[in-house]
Image (cartoon, rainbow, N blue to C red):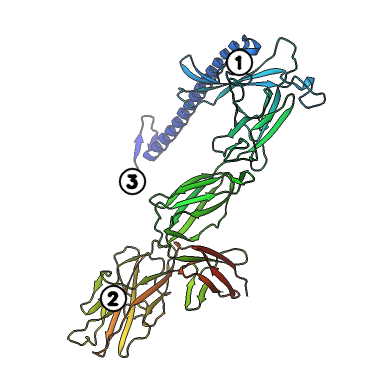
Amino acid sequence: MNFQIKCKNNLSYTLIEILIALFFIVVLSYLILGSFLNFLKSTLYSRLSLQILSALEDELEIIRVLNYEDVGIIDGWPRGKLTREKIVNYQGLDIKINYYIRNIDNPADGILGGNPNDSAPADYKLVELEGECLNCSIKIKKQTLTTIIAPKNVESSTKNGSLFIQVINASGQAISEANIQVINNATSPPIIINDLTNNQGMLQLIDIPTGTNVYQITVTKEGYSVDKTYLPGANENPNPIIPHQTVIEQSLTTVTFQIDRLANLDLKAINNFCEGINNLNLRLTGQKLIGTNPDIIKNIITTSTNSQGDQKLKLEWDNYLYEILNNEYILAGYNSSSPLVILPGLNYYLRLNIASSLGNSLLVSVLDNENNPLNEAEIELSKSNFEKILYTKTENIFHNNWLNNYSEISQNININKEGLTLKNINSVYPTGTDEWLISKTIDLGTSSNVELLSLKWEPINQPPQTEVKFQIAVNNDNTTWNFIGPDGTNNSYFNNSPSSLTNIPKNKRYLRYKIYLKTENENLTPLINEISLRFTSDCLANGQVLFSNLPLGVYNLLIKKNGFQIFTTSTNIQNRFKEIKVNLQPE
């Protein structure tokens, strides 16, 4: 249907043409309005910036009429009658003004320690004012004004010295606008200097009082690490690498500090079923030193996880060893080995798999020759009267007690301390029918890369004329339970121990098993006293497995993986926790 609007001049327009015209009018109006608003914002920004600069100019005029010896900071250096900061109201704007005043060595008459040497390096004063609006309707960049104040009289030699402070990052590049605090408590009143590094990452303190180990320096910058000096001879750090600085008469002292952007570490502590470990106490110990003889470590962080097993940390670049402080827990795997290498400004994720501490434990990490983790490597640990086989990145679920620990049960199943049997009714067992028990739901914690691997039960050998068999059901809704056997239907059963479960649907979070017991002899019953389900998932650590509850002693370790050479060694279990890393070589 074609709608038309007719006008007196015989022109006609379709409704679509009118809508298109209106659309372009709206877009054009929006662009014009946006440009106008940006113009108003730019105009307002310029006006407010000029007001801040005008306030700074007024302050500079006040400073210019001061006596030269009064141009300085109260309790700072050079000393004077000015405060470090103040707030002024200028035409309705609250403006915070920071004062930076520095002695400057003019190279025209030589420099301190140069040729020629300048014995009076404080040639003039550099005054820098920085203004920040506290109540502006839009965010205004800090404005800065700088001027030079020169003395009226000829300069004269002093008994002072100079201190140059260099700040660099981890790569050795200069850090500008780093905050420098310098404190000298040996003078009366104490000297307190708060200043910034220049574009070369340098703060030059010229013509300052002398003293031995009297200048305490702290270097900071928002989002960066901290570096500072330490008092020599103190109990906590008797031999600091960077001591409080010494300034000698008519001499130059130089000192270099390193700071860099902090890195972000997201820490996650879970068990092998992706459940967060609440209140796990951890200590991260860096390798940087701030003192020697004895070694004093700079970075030691103690932290704990929240109720979800998480923690977020800001870390200085360093190599960190991490350790678990809770006696009830042991490390069962990780996604990044210790030490954890942290570089400036990057984001890191550390996931720790945590297990209950059961006796002495051995964590085995299996890698290829390029340090990539190898999953499902078979690891046999043995000694006299002990043998156990586990597989990397797999977990075993053991059930050996079904008392009040099932979801459904048929009437002729008996549960006792020995396990599961048929009921003995009037001294005979029911024959010819399948009696059954369905487990409670087993939550694997994730559906990501979940694969059931095998099912095993004990005892393997059953009395003649008796039968044990299993079916498995899996899902992601914890509601729909379709029990199946090896052929994927409910008409087949797993009846050999161990049985492969690799045909069971993958990437399912929830599972239940169904045990069937049957006898053809009324005097005999089958017996199940333990079952184990082996699986893998993304909750498990790659290339690792934990042996727990180990008696002390020397063990034989044998590792096998298809496509790799067999590895054998011996290991002595002497402590609560030990880790072995093995690199397998290709065949």
Disc 3 on helix, strand or loop? loop
Comes first in the chain, label 3 or label 1: 3
For residue 206, side relative to residue 221 (left or right) = right
- Rendering quarter of residue 30: top left
Q: Which residue is mark 3?
A: 1
Residue positioned most to the right: 115
Q: Which residue is mark 1?
A: 80
The image position of residue 105, as x and y in percent, is: 73, 22
Task: Estimate the spatial distance between the alpha carbons at disc 1 and disc 2, rounded to whole Å.
Answer: 88 Å
Q: Are marks 3 and 1 in contact (CB under 8 Å)?
A: no
State the residue in front, 176 or 505. 176
Label 3 crowd bin: few (<14), some (14–19), many (20+), radius 10 Å? few
For residue 425, side relative to residue 250 (left or right) = left
Is residue 497 visible from the viewing direction of this image? yes
Comes first in the chain, label 1 or label 2: 1
The image position of residue 259, as x and y in percent, is: 61, 39
For residue 238, side relative to residue 283 (left or right) = right
Three-letter amino acid code at disc 3? Met
Q: Which residue is mark 2?
A: 417
